[in-house]
Image (tube, helix red, strand yellow):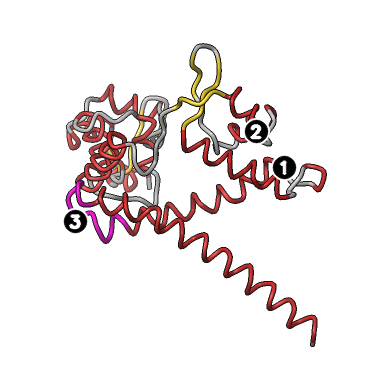
């Protein structure tokens, strides 16, 4: 059984030969969690599945050709993405163009926490909670937390919810925002898959950026409208059930 399994698996030297990736780099990828640890047949005998070949090859190209950090590469290698190098290259080009344009997702941190606490219905504890939930992503500048315009918009909406009556006294907490964040993350994963399947092979980075610049605000309006409509329909169904 061991010999049969070994024929389907590779020693690290063979994995390095087939991927063109140095042994030391492969070991570094393992330590960083980019690829799974090998199967240890004995203390000095480690084997890697053949499925590691495309992962190592892709990680190497993403690192050496697109200069991506290993932390981002690790996210890319997680299923169910399974994208080609060309698709990731387009994604990175789109990301860089959006960063340069600052639209539609501005992430430059310029707004100090002191200004937010002064003008919004939000506490220091809530800011820290929202940060721990990865809803906010402030930076530390001159010893104080500063927030991006996008974080500011999120906090303004959060503060407006407080003003509307969603108070802590009624049981509404900062942790509740995680429910919405998790749903949006799932939606973005779907949107990303659609984007790659339907646009990556047909459009340049410039064309994709133009669609995103115009389309993201429109999609936000669509989501808001659907939210309101579903709430109205839900309440209508409850009223119908109550009258029966």
Horizontal side of 83 relative to 37 (left or right) equals left
What is the secondary structure assignment of the residue under circle 1? loop
| Placement of the C terminus among the 4 image quadrants | bottom right
Q: Nearer the viewer, residue 73 or 115?
A: 115
Q: Are marks 2 and 1 in contact (CB under 8 Å)?
A: yes
Q: Mark 1 sits on what residue? A: 173
Q: Residue at x 34, y 46 (%)?
A: 5
Q: Residue at x 38, y 53 (%)?
A: 216
Instruction: For residue 40, say whether it is visible.
Output: no
The residues tagged by marks 2 and 1 sit, at their Cα atoms, a distance apart of 10 Å
Task: Check disc 3: other Cα within 10 Å, few if <14, some if 14-19, many if 20+.
Answer: few
* Residue 159 painted magenta: no
Horizontal side of 207 relative to 33 (left or right) equals left
Q: Nearer the viewer, residue 110 or 47?
A: 110
What span is colored magenta in the figure?
Answer: 195-207
Give above or below for 67 relative to 5: above
Q: Horizontal and vertical percent for residue 72? A: 36, 34
Comes first in the chain, label 3 or label 2: 2
Task: Check disc 2: other Cα within 10 Å, few if <14, some if 14-19, many if 20+.
Answer: some
Q: Mark 3 sits on what residue? A: 201
Using the rendered view, name the quadrant where residue 16 is placed. top left
Q: Horizontal and vertical percent for residue 52? A: 30, 41
Q: Are marks 3 and 1 in contact (CB under 8 Å)?
A: no
Disc 3 or disc 1, which is closer to the eye? 1
Q: Residue furthest front?
A: 119
Number of numbered discs overlaid on the protein picture: 3
Give above or below for 54 relative to 100: below
Q: Mark 2 sits on what residue? A: 129
Comes first in the chain, label 2 or label 1: 2
Q: Nearer the viewer, residue 126 or 91?
A: 126
Comes first in the chain, label 3 or label 1: 1
């Amino acid at each position: 059984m061991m010999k049969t399994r070994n024929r389907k698996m590779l020693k690290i030297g063979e994995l390095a030969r087939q991927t063109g990736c140095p042994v030391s780099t492969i070991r570094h990828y393992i330590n960083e969690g980019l690829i799974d640890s090998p199967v240890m047949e004995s203390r000095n005998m480690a084997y890697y599945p053949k499925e590691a070949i495309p992962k190592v090859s892709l990680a190497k190209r993403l690192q050496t050709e697109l200069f991506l950090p290993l932390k981002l590469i690790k996210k890319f290698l997680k299923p169910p993405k399974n994208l080609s190098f060309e698709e990731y290259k387009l994604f990175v080009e789109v990301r860089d163009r959006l960063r340069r344009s600052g639209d539609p997702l501005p992430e430059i941190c310029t707004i100090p926490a002191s200004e937010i606490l002064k003008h919004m219905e939000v506490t220091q504890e809530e800011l820290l909670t929202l940060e721990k939930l990865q809803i906010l992503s402030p930076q530390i500048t001159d010893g104080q937390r500063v927030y991006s315009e996008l974080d500011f918009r999120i906090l303004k909406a959060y503060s407006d919810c407080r003003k509307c009556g969603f108070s802590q006294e009624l049981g509404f907490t900062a942790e509740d925002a995680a429910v919405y964040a998790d749903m949006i993350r799932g939606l973005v994963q779907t949107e990303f898959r659609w984007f790659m399947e339907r646009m990556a092979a047909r459009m340049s980075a410039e064309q994709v950026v133009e669609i995103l610049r115009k389309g993201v605000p429109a999609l936000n309006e669509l989501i808001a409208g659907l939210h309101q409509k579903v709430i109205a329909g839900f309440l209508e169904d409850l009223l119908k059930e109550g009258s029966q």
